[in-house]
Amino acid sequence: MKSNQLAIGFVVLAVIFLVVAVLYALGALQLFASTTSGPHYKHAILFVVLAVASLIAANFTRAKTV
Amino acid sequence: MTPAQALFMGLLQGATELFPVSSLGHAVLIPSLLHWSFKQSDPSFVPFLVLLHLGTACALLIIYRTQWVDIIKGFFTAAVRGRIDTPSERLAMLLMVGTIPAAILGVFLETRIKSLFASPYVAAGFLVVNGALMLTFEQLRRRTERRAALDSRPRIEQEEGFAEAERISFRAAALVGACQALAFLPGISRSGVTIGGGLMAGLRHQEAARFSFLLATPVILAAGVLEVPQLFARGVPVGEYIAAAILSGVAAYLSARFLLRYFRSGRLDPYGWYCMGAGLVSLGLLALNL
């Protein structure tokens, strides 16, 4: 399924994941974390990975010009 | 934990990790049954197990070293190009899709699942469940073989009627990957549920095992990299634990070689019956406090 709208959706998702990753890394976000204070690097790494996966998905779904 | 106990745990972990019998379940159950005094609820126990898993991951990396080179190259090529052209590129993307659900579930459910580690009763119970799962997977596979009129053929020919790992669908890869999260429960086997998932997706037994082993490697490595620093920070006997991890790797290497040969024509049934028996016997021994 090739669609630029879908690709843009994945890019937006990637940006959201990156923001969430930064919030976890700074300790500003404690959602679903084992402790209620401090940074959560595991969660941050996970969201960076999800952001990269979203960008790959965007590249796969965008309409190719060639 | 004495040096002998650490080495025994390494051997046990390596020998049971790739067999569909739950290494974690055995690692929780056997020390309890042997009345070993170290506490499985100790914060250093899980990182120690992860260190042993790293030994296993190294064994898998050695076995599939040429495939991993192709997979990594394929991953970057396909990701940049935005298109899959070769089986290696497809396999790389399938592994990514399969790894993400396990990573999400692992990170978010980790704490709750860890609280279950302390109970050998839970591990024994889940070992019985694991056995039932293995037998169910094989029953469903036999039904598929009957529908495809393969049941009267020799086992090798039956297996040839099913697909290679690269042919699995992306949806199935995600489902098999999500099944990996079940293995955070002590007693449920990661390789068992992923091989079973692969069978349900129409893979040959040997290919389901290969996909399972490839899928396990990034998760085990990531868990190891994240947990091992905790182990070193606690002043534990690192030398002994590394020796145990090496022993674990050697045992895992031999296990993987055996299993890949076994699954050319073998089924999950013997492991299913073993898990049910071992789980029930363990529950009995624990209840009687023997």
Image: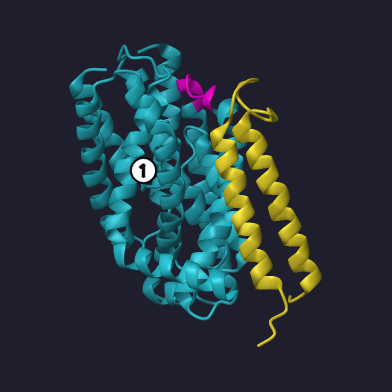
Chain colours: A yellow, B cyan
Q: Is residue B144 magenta?
A: no
Q: Answer with the quarter of the image where residue B181 lies.
A: top right
Nearer to us in this view, B186 or A64: A64
Q: Position of residue B180 (x, y in %)?
A: 53, 47
Question: Label 1: few (<14), some or many (≥20) within 10 Å?
Answer: many
What residue sits 25% from the left and 29% below the top?
B241
Q: Position of residue B168 (x, y in %)?
A: 55, 69
Q: Position of residue B25 (x, y in %)?
A: 42, 32
Quadrant of the rendering where the C terminus of chain A is positioned = bottom right
Q: What type is the residue that disc 1 sits on?
A: Glu
Q: Is residue A49 visible?
A: yes
What residue sits 68% from the left and 29% below the top?
A28
- Please determine whether, in this image, residue B161 is positioned above or below residue B115: below
B137 to the left or right of B224: right
Q: Secondary structure at mark 1?
A: helix
Q: Answer with the quarter of the image where residue B106 lies.
A: top right
B229 to the left or right of A59: left
Count the marks: how many? Answer: 1
Q: Position of residue B123 (x, y in %)?
A: 47, 28
What residue sits 77% from the left and 65% below the top?
A8
**Residue to which mark 1 is pinned:** B17
A47 to the left or right of B186: right
- Specify the farthest residue to the right: A5
Quadrant of the rendering where the N terminus of chain A is positioned = bottom right
Nearer to us in this view, B65 or A25: A25
A44 to the left or right of A62: left
Q: Is residue B140 visible?
A: no
Nearer to us in this view, B282 or A64: A64
The range drawn in magenta is B114-122
What residue sits 28% from the left and 47% below the top?
B252
Q: Chain of mark 1?
A: B
